[in-house]
Image (cartoon, rainbow, N blue to C red):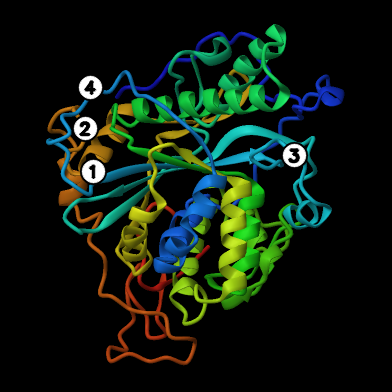
């Protein structure tokens, strides 16, 4: 079993002061992000189809973009990559600012319940690789636990091994410090260049950890972007296995199917503990990842509702969200991606969370110890051979990780289906839901998932 060693760490602060000169001496306090997955916007933008196309030039010109490269990945022959196959890395950041480094409104900070612009930083607390096969087969979203202890490619800020989420912030801090010292760029340009350096480091680190996989595109969003999406399409229907309450995230939910307003949606995807009920369910960071996956499915269900994406006000708010809170690579074409994402929102997507060996403490930090060989073998199987790491890992596909259960479209609490039998976890139930009692089983779109 290959795991990464503990190495002495240089002192390196991951957070960077705001780009405004008057605040440069104020360092962000490190705080764990509590946020829903940025991957939601992939489905939102694509699900708009023709409506997005009509406003394509507006949104395309307003989105922050930067390039990246993967020098450790052998350049693939363009003809060797099946047409239509894509690997997209989704990153959700711990920043309480927009893509230009500006502070958010008081309304948003109140809804986030996570401090203000001086809190958080640039950890990539949501990391998900979305693999879209060329043959129209089942796509897969691979969630990467944020605290996995891995090698950071290029040792940003002198740190060779740490939590995978920290690659972005360490590289951002390193580059920002260099640019501030030279004084050659404006505050705005220095900030954007430092963000690009953070993306480059995070993408390289994820690619290497997964087995030097090819990554074609990235999409990145901050905390406020998720809230803005929820605000545009609320209410959103979710399902919980148990009643739960949490003083930290503000969660206070009954068991069963329920509709969430935007602030409740934030609490739903942020919750990782229960402080109010003794229900025998011990929530962890992995349950929060499962919540994020479930919310994406619930959002896709919402997008399929008649009128959601034909409402001009809703569509405008989604586009404004993209322009203010979204970043992507320069080659990412939203227009051509529309039909693909619409297919995903229709139920052709399975979510998987990568395994860990155990929880551990390294350099005073709580981390996930991972078996790198096991992770890379699993990823090779899930991607169907898109890496150059050999033939191992086919078992992941052979074990049926991508086989969805019988399709069941959510139709409300009183819906009935022909088969009244009690289903196993993950199978469709009579009311159009599917129950998932653990975080480590594949979650299939197409039904409304009930989660912890």
The residue under the point 60% across, 33% down is 123
Which residue sits at x=50%, y=55%? 41
Q: Secondary structure at mark 4?
A: loop
Which element carries disc 2, helix, strand or loop? loop
Q: Nearer the viewer, mark 3 or mark 1?
A: 3
Q: Label 4, on which residue?
A: 74
C-alpha gap between disc 3 and disc 1: 38 Å
**Neighbours of disc 4 within 10 Å: few (<14), some (14-19), many (20+):** few
Identify the image quadrant of the N terminus.
top left
Q: Are marks 2 and 1 in contact (CB under 8 Å)?
A: yes
Answer whether residue 280 is visible to the viewer in this image. Answer: no
Residue 281 image point, x, y percent: 56, 59
Viewer-closest of 55 and 450:
55
Circle on res. 387? 2
Q: Residues within 10 Å of mark 3 (few under 14, many from 20)?
A: some
Callout 4–callout 1 Cβ contact below 8 Å? no
Q: CA distance from mark 4 to mark 2?
A: 10 Å
Of marks 3 and 1, which one's residue comes earlier in the chain?
Answer: 3
Residue ID for mark 3: 102
């Amino acid at each position: 079993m290959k795991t990464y060693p503990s190495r002495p760490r240089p002192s390196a602060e991951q957070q960077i002061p705001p780009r405004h000169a008057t605040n440069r001496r104020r360092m962000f306090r490190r705080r764990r992000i509590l946020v829903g997955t940025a991957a939601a916007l992939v489905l939102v933008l694509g699900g708009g189809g023709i409506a997005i196309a009509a406003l394509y030039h507006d949104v395309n010109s307003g989105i922050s973009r930067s390039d990246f490269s993967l020098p450790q990945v052998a350049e693939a022959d363009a003809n060797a990559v099946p047409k239509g196959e894509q690997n997209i890395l989704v990153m959700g950041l711990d920043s309480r600012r927009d893509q230009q480094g500006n502070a958010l409104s008081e309304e948003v900070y109140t809804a986030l319940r996570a401090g203000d612009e001086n809190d958080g930083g640039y950890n990539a607390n949501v990391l998900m690789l979305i693999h879209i096969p060329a043959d129209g087969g089942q796509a897969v979203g691979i969630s990467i636990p944020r605290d996995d202890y891995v090698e950071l490619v290029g040792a940003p800020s002198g740190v060779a091994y740490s939590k995978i989420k920290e690659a972005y912030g360490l590289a951002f801090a390193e580059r920002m410090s260099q640019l501030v010292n030279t004084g050659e760029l404006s505050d705005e340009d220095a900030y954007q260049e430092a963000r690009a350096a953070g993306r480059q480091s995070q993408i390289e680190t994820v690619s290497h950890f997964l087995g030097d996989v090819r990554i074609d595109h990235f999409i990145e969003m901050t905390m406020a972007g998720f809230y803005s999406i929820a605000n545009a399409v609320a209410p959103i229907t979710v399902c919980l296995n148990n009643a739960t309450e949490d003083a930290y995230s503000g969660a206070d939910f009954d068991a069963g199917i329920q509709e969430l307003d935007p602030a409740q949606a934030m609490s739903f995807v942020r919750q990782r503990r229960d402080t109010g009920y003794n229900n025998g369910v011990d929530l962890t960071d992995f349950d929060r990842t499962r919540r994020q996956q479930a919310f994406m499915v619930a959002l896709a269900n919402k997008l399929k509702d008649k009128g959601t994406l034909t409402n001009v006000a809703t569509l405008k708010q989604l586009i404004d969200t993209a322009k203010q809170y979204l970043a992507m690579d320069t080659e990412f074409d939203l227009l051509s991606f529309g039909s693909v994402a619409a297919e995903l929102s229709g139920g052709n997507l399975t979510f998987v969370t990568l395994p860990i060996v155990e929880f551990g403490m390294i350099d005073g930090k709580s981390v996930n110890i991972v078996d790198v060989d096991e992770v890379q073998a699993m990823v090779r199987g899930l991607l169907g051979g898109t890496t150059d790491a050999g033939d191992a890992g086919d078992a992941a596909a052979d074990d049926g990780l991508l086989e969805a259960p019988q399709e069941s479209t959510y139709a409300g609490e009183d819906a009935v289906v022909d088969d009244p039998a009690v289903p196993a976890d993950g199978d469709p139930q009579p009311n159009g839901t599917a129950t998932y009692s653990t975080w480590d089983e594949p979650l299939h779109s197409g039904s409304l998932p009930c989660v912890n």
